Amino acid sequence: MQETRLAWLMSLGEQERTLMLGTLSDGEREELKHHWELWARPQQLPPKDDWRIWLICAGRGFGKTRAGAEWVRAVARRDPNARIALVGASLSEARSVMVEGESGIMACCPPRFRPTFEPSLRKLTFPNGAVATLFSAAEPESLRGPQTSHAWCDEIAKWETAGNRAEKAWDNLMLGLRLGENPRVLATTTPRAVPLMQRIVDGRAGGQTAMVTGRSRENAANLPSRFLRDIEATLGGSALGRQELDGELLTDVEGALWTRTLLEQCRGKSAPLSRVVVGVDPPASSNGDACGIVVVGVGEDGLARVVADCSVTKPSPERWARAVANAAANWNADRVVAEANQGGAMVESVLRAAEVNLPIRLVHASRGKVARAEPVAALYEAGRVFHVGTFPELEDEMCALDMGGEYHGPGRSPDRADALVWALTELMLGARGRPRVWAQ
């Protein structure tokens, strides 16, 4: 119905629309501006079926925050006794995004119904007495005890997973969600393969979860065209693009050496590096697949950090060699480790032509990809490797390798994943796990 009203309004010519709006009082025009049911897309409005959990799982820029803020406003307007929990990944994010953000609660409420925000108390009080309180999912115990009638949880897939904090925060919230006749929670998020996300999605089988999905492009009318163009150029065609743009919860290959959940648990922050290695998987020919070039470092804490994927697709020998040299220079690498199966002398000569002083080690793949990758995957399981940022194409390849030796794409060969394995083997496994080195 709201689509029909909006379509009718927008179908009017500019003059007709101006005349129609001119017949409204200032108060009526202000009311029209804040008439969310008129402007919202259907996926941004609460489901009509009965639900306890409403999950909006959608791409970046879909309008999830606006939907959450408007739902809180509607709840508060209807029920003066509402006690609403606003749960963010941290208190600062709850305040800056959910409350004070451009699409947050303060911006969405008309002046006559704008709440009073008391940052020191982490509390918003609406004119009719409804109250919303801010919580951090990183502090699960803060949610133990308070009783609520409603909750808005933002970016749940981003909540801290260490020590099961995300799940503890969710469980404590749900145990306190017991005020009123129909307690409900809205969770808004871009999906990531984390345990809490999977739990909530699986709840659909019991009928308590209503799930809405959506793509970034559905909100194109309200997004800068350059944003969509740039992000689609960066992530389009990758599995991560399906997640970040299309709002798709990615599933894992059965028996994969790396899973999406594992990689999400291995996100880390940058740190000073005491040693840096560039792993290289050269293409077999000048018109072959990509040249995998991955930069990995180890910090004083003994933990490895993947810091860059500098791989190039379908490169000439000169181009991939120059990319390797640039990566080594940019990261002040101690060593370049390159697979020599496609001709050791050729690989070294190409690299030397690009940079004569490169510290090169040529390695030979005497074992299969899985045999080489398994001890490296074990490093991830042990919490000894972190990814500083996200590397969509590299991570797609990692998650497509299974323990049976099969590679499930993208592309014909996991060039980036191979380069990663060579670098981490050199950096973290030493002589124990190092592939055989050919004498030069």
Image (spheres, rainbow, N blue to C red):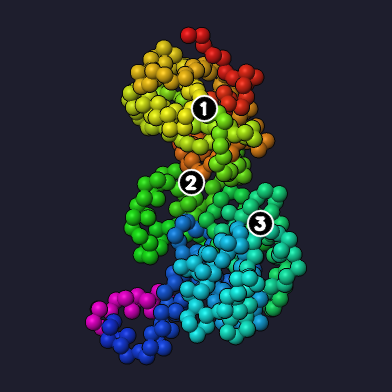
Mark 2 or mark 1, whichever is nearer to me: 1
> How crowded is the residue under tag 3: few (<14 C-alpha within 10 Å), some, or many (20+)?
many
Q: Does the magenta stretch include residue 7?
A: yes
**What amino acid is labelled 1 in the image?**
Val
Circle 2 residue: 240
The disc placed on residue 53 is: none
Task: State the extent of the magenta-drawn residues as a range.
Answer: 1-16
Q: Residue at x 43, y 84 (%)?
A: 31
The disc placed on residue 138 is: 3
Q: Residue at x 47, y 68 (%)?
A: 103
Q: Residue at x 46, y 32 (%)?
A: 331
> Does residue 379 lie above or below 261 as drawn?
above
Is any part of residue 333 visible from this angle?
A: yes
> Residue 94 or 11: which is nearer the viewer?
94
Q: Does the magenta stretch include residue 150?
A: no
Q: Residue at x 46, y 76 (%)?
A: 36
- The mark that comes first in sequence, 2 or 3, is 3
